[in-house]
Image (tube, helix red, strand yellow):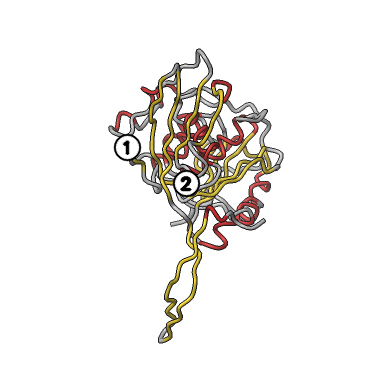
């Protein structure tokens, strides 16, 4: 399946190779704003504007509202619709009696694509640790060897990245190895929201799920994962110190630098079978 035309745009570029210059057409990933509104009890309110790659906008809106703990789950939603056929505005209309927790998010008008926290209005609004439940280690441990196949499977699913080179990807797998959902976006936090929004409308078991990230594992991605009680995150890139701290605190198994034959596990290795007792390297 070819990448959606709504996600890419051709543009002339000058390709320089040593002393040669060639004018050719390059494919760029599209970045556009998306405004998310909530309609509740006859009142319509703008929640946020995020820069995203068009596609799966309804899933993005739903996933954002759940991951930011504005909504508890998808059952609170009556309908999600676009304002006009080509509009960059999504309205989420809630069912009667459903009350959005808008105090749980405090954002400026625009969130950047690169960081899901850049629009927060204060440091106090960044962390919702006090309201997060710890994730229990109830599932059967998974073989460490299962993780080795994830980089290739994730890379194979990055269809828009293949033609643009400019996107993050997030995939959800169940702990038996089945691919549940995958999305790409210029914003890694948007890709997580799209995956959450896709799965939230299904008969989904978060406790039997892991999230795979094509890049680094930042704090905001761990926070969104904790909000929906997914117990394992694996990342192709490195985690940040704050991401490790949060994963340790809420009970998430965090893996970084995942390769075809190796990885680092930073927190809660008990969810992986055949994990070894670490020894210090000789200095």
- Where disc 1 sits, the SS reads loop
Looking at this view, name the residue that lies furthest to the front. 84
Sooner in the amino-acid sequence: mark 2 or mark 1: 1
Q: Position of residue 247 (x, y in %)?
A: 47, 35
Classify mark 1: residues with Cα within 10 Å, few (<14), some (14-19) or many (20+): some
In which quadrant will I find the N terminus?
bottom right
* Neighbour tally class for label 2: few under 14, some 14-19, many 20 plus, Cα within 10 Å: many
- Dividing the picture into quadrants, the one containing residue 110 is top left
Q: Is residue 264 visible?
A: no
Residue 72 seen from this side: yes
Identity of the residue drawn at 63% across and 50% down: 150
- Rounded to the nearest angstrom, the CA distance separating label 2 from label 1 is 19 Å
* Horizontal side, residue 145 vs residue 158: left or right: right
The vertical placement of 141 against 32, above or below, is: above
Residue receiving disc 2: 188
Q: Which mark, residue 162? A: none
Q: Which residue is mark 1?
A: 109
Determine the residue positioned at 39% across, 30% down: 47
- 203 left or right of 186 in image: right
Frontmost of labels 2 and 1 is 1
**Secondary structure type for disc 2:** helix
Question: Eyeballing the image, is 18 above or below 194?
Answer: below
The foreground one among 281 and 149 is 149
Residue in view at x 52 percent, y 14 percent: 96
Horizontal and vertical percent position of residue 154: 61, 52
Residue 19 horizontal/vertical position (percent): 40, 87
Location of residue 253 in the rendering, given as x and y in whole percent from the top left corner: 54, 37
In front: 7, or 259?
7
Quadrant into which the C terminus falls: bottom left
């Amino acid at each position: 399946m070819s990448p959606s035309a709504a996600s890419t745009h051709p543009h002339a570029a000058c390709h320089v190779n040593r002393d040669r210059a060639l004018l050719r057409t390059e494919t760029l990933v599209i970045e556009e704003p998306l405004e998310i509104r909530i309609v509740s009890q006859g009142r319509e309110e703008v929640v946020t504007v995020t820069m995203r790659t068009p596609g799966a906008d309804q899933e993005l809106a739903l996933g954002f509202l759940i991951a930011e703990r504005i909504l508890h789950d998808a059952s609170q939603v009556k309908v999600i619709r676009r304002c006009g056929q080509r509009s960059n505005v999504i309205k989420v209309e809630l069912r009667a009696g459903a009350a959005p927790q808008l105090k749980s998010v405090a954002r400026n008008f625009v969130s950047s694509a690169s960081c899901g926290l850049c629009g927060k209005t204060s440091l106090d609004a960044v962390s919702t640790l006090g309201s997060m439940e710890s994730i229990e280690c109830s599932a059967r441990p998974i073989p460490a060897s299962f993780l080795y196949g994830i980089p290739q499977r994730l890379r194979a699913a990055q269809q828009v990245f293949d033609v643009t080179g400019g996107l993050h990807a997030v995939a959800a797998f169940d702990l038996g190895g089945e691919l549940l959902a995958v999305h790409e976006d210029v914003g890694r936090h948007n890709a997580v929201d799209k995956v959450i929004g896709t799965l939230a409308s299904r008969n989904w078991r978060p406790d039997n799920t892991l999230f795979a990230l094509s890049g680094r594992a930042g704090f905001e991605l761990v926070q969104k994962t904790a909000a929906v009680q997914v117990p394992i995150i694996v990342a192709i890139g490195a985690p940040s110190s704050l991401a490790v701290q949060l994963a340790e605190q809420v009970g998430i198994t965090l893996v970084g630098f995942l390769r075809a034959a190796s990885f680092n596990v930073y927190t809660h290795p008990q969810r992986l079978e055949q994990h070894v007792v670490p020894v210090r390297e000789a200095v």
